[in-house]
Amino acid sequence: MWKNKIENILDGIKGRRVLVVGDVMLDHFVRGEVNRISPEAPVPVVRVTSESDMPGAAANVAMNLASLGAVPVMVGAIGNDADGAHLKDLLTKAGVDCSGLIVDENIHTTRKVRIIARSQHVVRVDWDGIVKEDDSVHAALMEACEKLAPSCDVLILQDYNKGLCGKELNDTLAKSGKPLLVDPNRYCKEPYSGTLATPNLEEALILSGYKPKGQPVDELSGIAEAFFARHSVESLVITLSEHGIALCERSGEIKRAKAATLRGVFDVSGAGDTVVAVLAASLAAGGELWDACRLANIAGGIVVGKSGTASTTVEELKSNLPND
């Protein structure tokens, strides 16, 4: 029975080491209420009722892995600033191994502030910490990857277009001999390499260069063929939002699962990070790729029903598994 098989995979996640390499950031959420328009400009006045901080981007992938009982090993870069120190503290308290988190004087920690009024996003304000190609942080990151990868079961490259995840880093991870999941960025100019790429549908379109004649969700075969022609990955998992998830193979085979939105869509922030984390954790536990995809699809359906950059647990996943 599929449910029993998946429960065994979930039980096998505990203690599995997963290397997470990529751009990290601090997500700050400001929540409040809107009752009037500002007399200074035609904008809403948000009366703040609460604030919270969560690790975001690649750091959110690490948090999701920790929530599943895996041992995430974080490789990334933060500035020598208060946001960086706070981010590292949040990760450490969650059980993330931060031995590969580089503190660099030449950058500042990326911080994103989301202002939300009654579940509606009003505005997002970003402070981006960009890593330049000639920055000394790259050498430190390469050294951390080479040191930590051999002790991990699965590797993840999480590209958020902050200058960290260049081709040299990608190639180094791909040559490690370990399964590598690549969560690509639509603005990347270089081809990706690895075991598996995990774009959403819009990213898959851009990174493949495919021009659909109709609805992209109905032309996955053409998108996948074009993607494989450009990128050196063995398999392609495309998240399709309300249409679910698709696993595309180089052979042309495509498997699809319907969306598993279980609680209604409340907040999509970080849902893709959850999908990547569950895929990696499942593969680290010895699960087959299609089983990992179906499980990741369920996980995505759970977290979009939560507020902020949320995560899920093994127990929560087990309680939402279908019987077939």
Image (tube, rainbow, N blue to C red):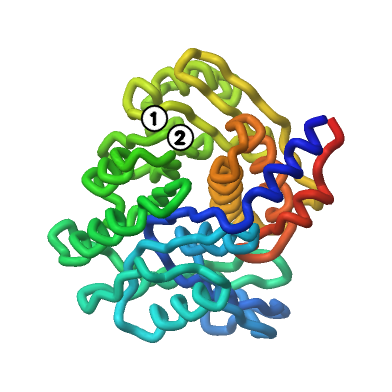
Front residue of 131/14: it is: 14
Percent position of residue 41, x then y? 52, 77
Within 10 angstroms of label 2, few (less than 14), some, or many (20 or more) residues? many
Image height check: is 100 above or below 203? below
137 horizontally vs 260: left or right: left
Q: Residue 196 — which label?
A: 2
Is residue 57 shown to the viewer in this render?
yes
Is residue 43 shown to the viewer in this render?
no
The answer for how far apart the CA atoms under marks 2 and 1 are is 6 Å
Residue occupied by mark 1: 233
Percent position of residue 180, x then y? 41, 41
Which corner quadrant of the image does residue 245 belong to? top right
Which corner quadrant of the image does residue 288 belong to? top right
Cβ–Cβ below 8 Å for labels 2 and 1?
Answer: yes
Q: Dot 2 lies on which element?
A: strand
Residue flagged by tag 1: what amino acid is it? Val
Percent position of residue 62, x then y? 51, 61
Front residue of 152/101: it is: 152
